[in-house]
Image (spheres, rainbow, N blue to C red):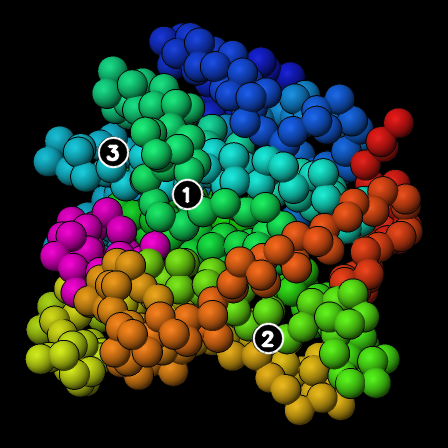
Amino acid sequence: MSTVDLNAKIPNNVDLFQDKRLLRALEQWQPNYLSWWKDMGPADFQEKDVWLRTAISVDAEGWANFDYVKMPDYRWGIFLADPLPDRRIGFGDAMGEPAWTVVPGEHRNTLRRLIVTQGDTEPASVEQQRLLGHSAPSLYDLRNLFQVNVEEGRHLWAMVYLLHSYFGRDGREEAEELLLRRSGNPDKPRILGAFNQPIDNWLDFFMFTMFTDRDGKYQLLALAESGFEPLARTTRFMLTEEAHHMFVGESGVERVVERTAELMKLDPNGDARAQGGIDLGTLQKFLNLWFALSLDLFGGEISSNAASYFAAGLKGRAKEETYEEHRALDQSYRMSVLADGAVVEQDVPLRNAMNEVLRDAYVEDCARGVERWNKRLAEAGLGERLSLPSKRFHRHIGIYADMPFDDEGRLLTRGDFEARKGDYLPTEADREYVRSLMKPVREPGKIAQWLGRPARGIKGLPFEYEYVRLD
Ligand SMILES: [Fe+2]
Ligand SMILES: [Fe+2]
C-alpha cells in the first residue's frame, strides 16, 4: 500500500516531492485555495476546534484520524486509491486495452470538461452551506456540517491535482477558475443548476446531502470506472469520504421524521407545526424539490455526449462489473419518453441511454432511503408516508424540461400547474416557517425542538460530546 506523506506542505500519497514542477504549481495554488476558504468557507467558526476526521491513509479500514482541528489547519491533500495491478479499460470501444496513465490526446478536451464539471460542484456546495453554522440544531450537527465542508474542499484538491498534473497550462487556468466562480452569482455562477440554489436552512441541507451528494456518489462511481487511471483512482478514494455526506443527509431527514412523528402524537390535532416541528407536508415538498434538482444533474435522457463518453472509455456505468456486457452495442434501454406530447415507453440504443441508466440506479438508491424513513413513520403508528415524486416532475434539463408535470407525472395545463405548485414545492410561507425554527442550539447534549437525537455520536463518542468547542 502507498504511504501518505502527512508532514509535507501538501499531504499526499503520490510522491509529490519527486515532481518539482507539479509541486511548485500546487504550492502556488494552495494560498489561493486558502484565501477562497477564508472568504467562502463556513462563516465565523474558523478559529474553533472541531472534532474532525482527516485522511491519513487510503486503506479501506482505518484511513481516518479523529482529533480537534481548526478548519483552516485541516490537512487538505491528495489521496489516490492504490492502483489495481494490470488494470484494463472495462467498457466501451477500447475495452480490454491497458488503462491510460496519461491523457490520450483525442480525449483531452472531453476529460478536462468532465473533471472541471465534477470539480466545480465541490467548492460550490461549501459556498451554499456557508451560513448554516449560525443555526445548527446541535453541536453534533454543527460538526457534521464542517466535516462535509472540509471534505468537499479536499475533493476540489483531488480534481485540481488532476488538472495540474495532466492538463498543463489549460489545467492550471481551470484550477484558478474553480476558485473564481461563485454559487448563485449571476455573473459567474457555478456550472450546474442545483449548485446555485441557496441553502439557508437545515432542512435544505439534509435534503441536499441526501439527494445531491448522492448524485455525486453516482457520478463518482461512473468516473471510478474510467479508463483514465488517475481519475479512476482519485474518485475511488473520494467515494469513501462521500459515504459520510450521504449518511448526514439520510440520517438527518430520518431524525426529522422521527421527531415529527413524536410531535404529531403529542398534539391533540396531530399537528407537528403546532408543536414547533416540521409537518410531513412540508418535508415532502422539500424532498420533491431536491430530488428533482438532483435528477437534472444526470443530464438529458437521450444523450449523444453520454454515448461518446462511454464509447471512449471515459465514463462507465456505476459498478460496471455487475453488467454482463460492457460494450453496450446492439442493446437498448426501455425508458419513457415524450412523443407528440404524450409519455410513451420506448427502446433507446443503450449507449445513448447512459444518463438514464445512471439516473435509474440513483433513483433506486433514493427509494431505499425513503423506505427507511417510512419505516420510522410505521413504527410510530402513523399512516402517512413520504414518497419520491415522478422523474418528470419539476425538471429543467432533458426531455421533460420546463413542462408542467405534477408529482405523479401527469401532464397538467400550465395554469393548473401554477395553481397547484404550492402543493408540490415549498412556498415562501413554508420557507419562512422553516427558517423561523432555525435557532442555534450550542450546549453539548441539547438539540433543537424540530429534530430527533441521533442513535449514536461520532466514532463511538456519545451525542453529548463537545464536538465543537465554542469558547
Ligand atoms: Fe464531494
Ligand atoms: Fe459530498
SS assignment at label 2: helix
Residue depth check, mark 1 versus mark 2: number of the one nearer the observer: 2
The residue indicated by pointer 2 is 281
Q: Look at 70% across and 53% down and name the residue there.
A: 436
Q: Which of 379 and 456 is in front in this view?
A: 379
Relative image position of residue 244 (x, y in whole percent): 62, 52
Q: Residues within 10 Å of mark 2 (few under 14, many from 20)?
A: some
Q: Look at 75% across and 22% down and name the residue there.
A: 47
Q: Residues within 10 Å of mark 3 (few under 14, many from 20)?
A: many
Q: What residue type is labelled 3?
A: Arg
Quadrant position of residue 161: top left
Q: Residues within 10 Å of mark 1 (few under 14, many from 20)?
A: many
Answer with mark 1 or mark 3, whichever residue precedes in sequence. Answer: 3
Gap in Å between the C-alphas at discs 2 and 3?
Answer: 42 Å
Circles 2 and 3: CB atoms closer than 8 Å: no
Q: Is residue 64 visible?
A: no
Q: Which amino acid does label 2 sit on?
A: Gly
The residue indicated by pointer 3 is 112
Gap in Å between the C-alphas at discs 1 and 2?
Answer: 25 Å
Specify the quadrant that holds the C terminus: top right
Relative image position of residue 407 (x, y in whole percent): 40, 77
Relative image position of residue 163 (x, y in whole percent): 32, 26
